[in-house]
Image (tube, rainbow, N blue to C red):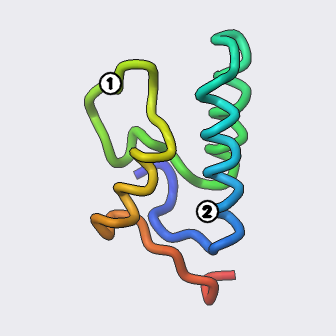
């Protein structure tokens, strides 16, 4: 695993904001946004090996939380 699977609520909200930005960004900007997401510690490739058509989105991220593959814990700071 390159990243983490436990995030704070504020990190979760920032990841969601960045994913929303990535989804609508032109292709030439998506890599920069993905790097910002990775700086927080979230690597989608840690959880999904298949390629999502159009890339991953907020629903994919929230599904990882629902499936308890990612936990949100404000006591990790």
Q: Which residue carries the number 1 mark?
A: 51
Q: CA distance from mark 1 to mark 2?
A: 22 Å
Q: Residues within 10 Å of mark 1 (few under 14, many from 20)?
A: few
Q: The residue tagged with tag 1: helix, strand or loop? A: loop
Residue 25: numbered disc: none
Q: Residue at x 69, y 48 (%)?
A: 17
Residue 12: numbered disc: 2
Q: Are marks 1 and 2 in contact (CB under 8 Å)?
A: no
Give the mark nearer the N terminus: 1 vs 2: 2
The picture places residue 55, in percent across and down from the top left corner, at: 45, 25
Q: Which quadrant holds residue 32? A: top right
Q: The residue tagged with tag 2: helix, strand or loop? A: helix
Q: Nearer the viewer, residue 51 or 77?
A: 51
> Which quadrant is the C terminus positioned in?
bottom right
* Vertical order, 55 against 9 (above or below): above
The picture places residue 74, in percent across and down from the top left corner, at: 63, 84
**10 displayed left or right of 59:** right
**8 displayed left or right of 51:** right
């Amino acid at each position: 695993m390159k990243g983490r699977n436990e995030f704070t609520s504020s990190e979760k909200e920032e990841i969601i904001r960045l994913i929303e930005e990535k989804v609508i960004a032109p292709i030439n900007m998506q890599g920069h946004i993905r790097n910002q997401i990775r700086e927080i510690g979230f690597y989608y490739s840690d959880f999904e090996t298949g390629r999502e058509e159009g890339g991953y989105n907020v629903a994919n991220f929230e599904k990882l939380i629902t499936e308890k593959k990612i936990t949100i814990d404000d006591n990790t700071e």
